[in-house]
Amino acid sequence: MGKLTGTLVGLIALSASLAHGRVLEDLEQLDSAKQSYDFVIVGGPSGIGGSTVASRLSENPRFNVLLIEAGPTNEGVIDIAVPGFFRNISSTYSWGHVTTPQIGLNNRSFPYNQARVLGGCSSHNGMVYTRGSSDDFDLWGKVSEDRSWSWKTLFPYFLRNEKLVPPPGGRDASGQYDPQYHGTRGLTLVSLPWGGPTDFDRLAIKNAEQNKEIKFNLDVNSGKPSGLVWVQSTIGNGERCSAAVGVLGGQVKERPNLTILLNTQVTRVLPSKESRQLDIRTVEIISFSSGNKTTVTANKELIVSAGAFGTPHLLLNSGIGDKKELEDVKVKSIHHLPDVGKGLSDHLAFQVSWSANGVVRPVDTVAAFEEWQTNRTGPLTETGVHQLMFSRITPDAPLFKEHRDPAAGPNSPHIEIVVLSVGPRILASVGLLTPKSRGTVKIASNNPLDKPLIDLGYLTHPFDLLALKEGARIAKRWFEGSAYEGYITGFLGPDPDTLPEKEFDNALKAGAGTWWHPVGTASISPKGAKHGVVDPELKVKGVKGLRVVNASAIPYVPTAHTQAAVYVLAERASDLIRASW
Ligand SMILES: *[C@@H]1O[C@H](CO)[C@@H](O)[C@H](O)[C@H]1NC(C)=O
Ligand SMILES: *[C@@H]1O[C@H](CO)[C@@H](O)[C@H](O)[C@H]1NC(C)=O
Ligand SMILES: *[C@@H]1O[C@H](CO)[C@@H](O)[C@H](O)[C@H]1NC(C)=O
Ligand SMILES: *[C@@H]1O[C@H](CO)[C@@H](O)[C@H](O)[C@H]1NC(C)=O
Ligand SMILES: *[C@@H]1O[C@H](CO)[C@@H](O)[C@H](O)[C@H]1NC(C)=O
Ligand SMILES: CC(=O)N[C@H]1CO[C@H](CO)[C@@H](O)[C@@H]1O
């Protein structure tokens, strides 16, 4: 770095520290000698988990908190702020991960976007706010043998986190949600879409009146998501409300007890030498710009919230994982914990389509952007999706003769269908919410800067392909409904009922892609159990000082888009952490 730029950076740093409290652009600004931190939170992405915990812990003036983020700030990035631009957020803000060849998908490997920006996935996701079913959360309690993880105990945390606000533009959305299930005082803004009901939305409502399988459901977030629902999104005042904007936004970033360190990667967690029990509260960090390294030690606890890929990547690099597998890549094992990186699970989806007499005109982006800039209203305040469908696979479906139903309970739908009407086409993305396939996150070498090996194991369990096929049938039956007569002109497939089995399966494998909901790589399990990675208090098993607060701790992917579940996990985790100090 040149001297002039160095000085400039210094000046910017100075003004930044005056303007924003303590948001540091680079490691070089961290005066670790002068500061000591009670809690160090490892993000990267420091998305929902890390941001929520940082926000809650720094409420207490007795705690000094450091949040470390690998990526840059979200501030001033227009594609992140404008909801309708989410599809073209630059790859600068992601890790550039690529999956291993997926055996279940004809050996395809593909890019897997994971955010590398403040706010994490909530800064670049599709903003859908669905919690999942009550059964999904009760299952966490069963798996961890700790009934304090349940829908009932977690429900108040959903409310604490959420602030339901009117749709952008302020249209009346009554009849499209049920206020009793919503919070009104949290920091995460949630709203119904700006537009609608369109003619296409009305057709769906009408169709639901006659449909036996998918009925209108007033609120997807009641714990019973099945049915046709209006979408709710983490959008407020026409802008994306990510964790960086919501739980870390406004006054929170100004707190003198919260330091946010950007553009810094955590490469390892290190055990302290003095302690006899394995005590891990130190992180080794590296600056993205200078490559300079240093360490920071938390007085109280280290909290890892680095996501379903980043969390196991970090633990494995640190020597926490399966001893034998670590030796194979020449990493010295410090703690044998075989399940680190195992149990990866995700939502896979594929597309079916119809031709239709639709006349949905494309958005005039220039005019819409002007409207967004002046008024924070218009089509760019939403993603274009107004409604979602959630459905169970009927119990008499043949696949249940061979396979046990993986759903957490009767309230958990197996299938989600996201429908988009684009001119003369209707596109339905059919996703499997209850996969049986599992994958892994491993490391390729002992260099922490090398990318992890991400194998999602899609369709490696035969249930999943059969279930997706049933999903396509559910979508077909829906659009055969009388409300669509004269509107739909034909099914364009792929059709599970007319194509030869092999051909259909291949079309599905060739077209399927992710909904970016990975969980399970540092799974919760009962206290004292040998399997799993964290105990019911989210502490890493057999280690002092170290917790995991992220989607990686979620044992089974909820039947929902995962962000709401991570918020609630992190809200509860914050209480657990505060209670222990
Ligand atoms: C937190 O900030 C307050 C107000 O600036 C200060 O008095 C206190 O010492 C800080 N606490 C810690 C733990 O640094
Ligand atoms: C971003 O998305 C909008 C709408 O999808 C598109 O019109 C615009 O050209 C995109 N911008 C870039 C830089 O790709
Ligand atoms: C995928 O790769 C595996 C292992 O290399 C190989 O055995 C298999 O035949 C390949 N499958 C396809 C569909 O190419
Ligand atoms: C990196 O560390 C070295 C040694 O401590 C220091 O001299 C140098 O200024 C640092 N680099 C930057 C960009 O601050
Ligand atoms: C913004 O809103 C005002 C008041 O409703 C309206 O007159 C104006 O045309 C809007 N501006 C744009 C660019 O849509
Ligand atoms: C805090 C944090 O890192 N959140 C991440 C948790 O896991 C999900 C799924 O992997 C990520 O998308 C989040 O960014």
Image (spheres, rainbow, N blue to C red):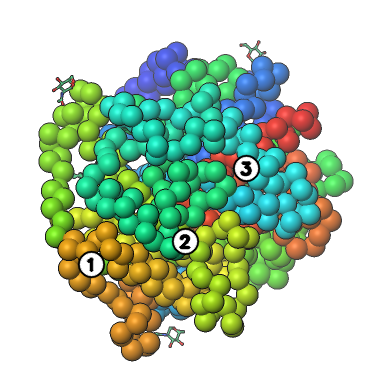
- Residue 404 visible, this orientation: yes
Q: Tell me the quarter of the image containing the C terminus.
A: top right
**Mark 3, residues whose alpha carbon is within 10 Å: few (<14), some, or many (≥20)?**
many
The numbered mark, 1 or 2, whose residue comes first in the sequence reads 1
Q: Looking at the picture, tell me which residue is in the foreground, 417 or 3.
A: 417
- Residue 116 visible, this orientation: no
Q: Amino acid at mark 2?
A: Ser
**Mark 1, residues whose alpha carbon is within 10 Å: few (<14), some, or many (≥20)?**
some
Q: Quadrant of residue 323?
A: bottom right
- In the image, taking residue 355 as reference, residue 123 lies left or right, namely right
Q: Which residue is mark 1?
A: 354
Q: Amino acid at mark 1?
A: Trp
Q: Which residue is mark 3?
A: 569
Residue 303 vertical position relative to residue 3 in the rendered view, above or below: below
The x, y position of residue 333, in whole percent, is 72, 60
Which structural element holds mark 1? strand
Which structural element holds mark 2? strand
Q: Tell me the quarter of the image containing the N terminus.
A: top left
- The disc placed on residue 391 is 2
Mark 1 vs mark 2, CA separation in Å:
20 Å
The numbered mark, 1 or 3, whose residue comes first in the sequence reads 1
Q: Amino acid at mark 3?
A: Leu
Which residue is located at x 38 percent, y 81 percent? 505
Mark 3 vs mark 2, CA separation in Å:
25 Å
Residue lying furthest right in this view? 276
The x, y position of residue 16, in whole percent, is 41, 19
